[in-house]
Image: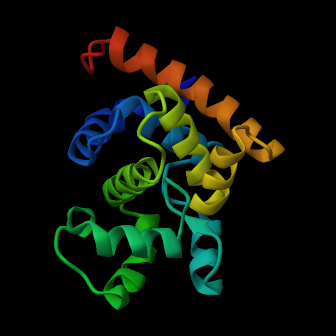
């Protein structure tokens, strides 16, 4: 259940970031809910600090890897609130640990970038599902599966299923509780 992820604390931030990036807040929240599962508090974890020290893995509420964050921050000044160099974005990656709003914005724009790589004739539901797979596995593997016409990796099938479940939960929260006008 999404309420276990402190959704009430982040609903407005998720909606704001999704609207700014031009994506559905339910899709953004589905990814954030999945990526932060099991954490005591979104974006704050000892493992994140270890990953920064070791310069590996992913961190923050969206569990974003350094390369994905850097690319997103450089391409979208909205993420950090200004235009940044690659070096500045590299240095800002560690901020994802404790800045949940930053993690939400970065996740939103990264999801938008992944969607932009997909064929425009895909249905909106398939575009979000495949972008979620890309968020988990990377753009290359996402596009490989699109070309193949199937989710060829078990990890992709599992992530897709979880994304669909989280999207339904987010739909109930955002739409039925009047946080967001859904159509």
Residue at image location 44% in from the left, 69% down from the top = 69
Name the spot of residue 39 as percent of width and height, x first: 61, 48
In this rendering, position of residue 183 left or right of residue 35: left
Name the spot of residue 159 as percent of width and height, x first: 69, 40
Count of labels in the image: 0
Considering every residue shown, the one lying at the far top of the view is: 176
Question: Where is 133 relative to 76, above or below?
Answer: above
Question: Where is 175 relative to 62, above or below?
Answer: above
Q: Quadrant of residue 171?
A: top left
Residue at image location 21% in from the left, 62% down from the top = 78
- Of residues 72 and 58, the one nearer the viewer is 72
Colour setup of the view: rainbow
Q: Quadrant of residue 81?
A: bottom left
Considering every residue shown, the one lying at the far right of the view is: 154
Split into 4 quadrants, where in the image is the C terminus?
A: top left
Considering every residue shown, the one lying at the far left of the view is: 82
Name the spot of residue 95 as percent of width and height, x first: 39, 72
Residue at image location 53% in from the left, 19% down from the top = 168
Name the spot of residue 17 as percent of width and height, x first: 27, 46
**Res 5 visible:** no
- Of residues 1 and 119, the one nearer the viewer is 119
Split into 4 quadrants, where in the image is the N terminus?
A: top right
In this rendering, position of residue 179 left or right of residue 44: left
Question: Where is 50 relative to 27, above or below?
Answer: below
**Res 155 visible:** yes
């Amino acid at each position: 259940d999404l309420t276990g992820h402190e959704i009430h604390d982040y609903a407005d931030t998720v909606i704001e970031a999704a609207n700014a990036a031009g994506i559905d807040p339910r899709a953004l929240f589905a990814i954030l809910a999945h990526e932060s599962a099991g954490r005591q508090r979104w974006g704050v974890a000892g493992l994140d600090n270890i990953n920064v020290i070791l310069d590996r893995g992913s961190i923050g509420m969206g569990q974003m890897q350094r390369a994905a964050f850097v690319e997103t921050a450089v391409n979208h000044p909205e993420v950090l609130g200004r235009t940044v160099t690659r070096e500045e974005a590299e240095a800002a990656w560690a901020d994802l640990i404790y800045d949940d709003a930053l993690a939400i914005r970065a996740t939103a724009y990264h999801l938008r970038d992944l969607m932009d790589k997909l064929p425009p004739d895909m249905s909106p539901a398939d575009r979000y599902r495949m972008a979620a797979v890309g968020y988990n596995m990377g753009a290359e593997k996402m596009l490989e599966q699109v070309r193949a016409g199937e989710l060829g990796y078990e990890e992709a099938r599992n992530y897709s299923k979880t994304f669909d479940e989280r999207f339904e939960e987010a739909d109930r929260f955002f739409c039925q509780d009047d946080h967001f006008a859904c159509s």
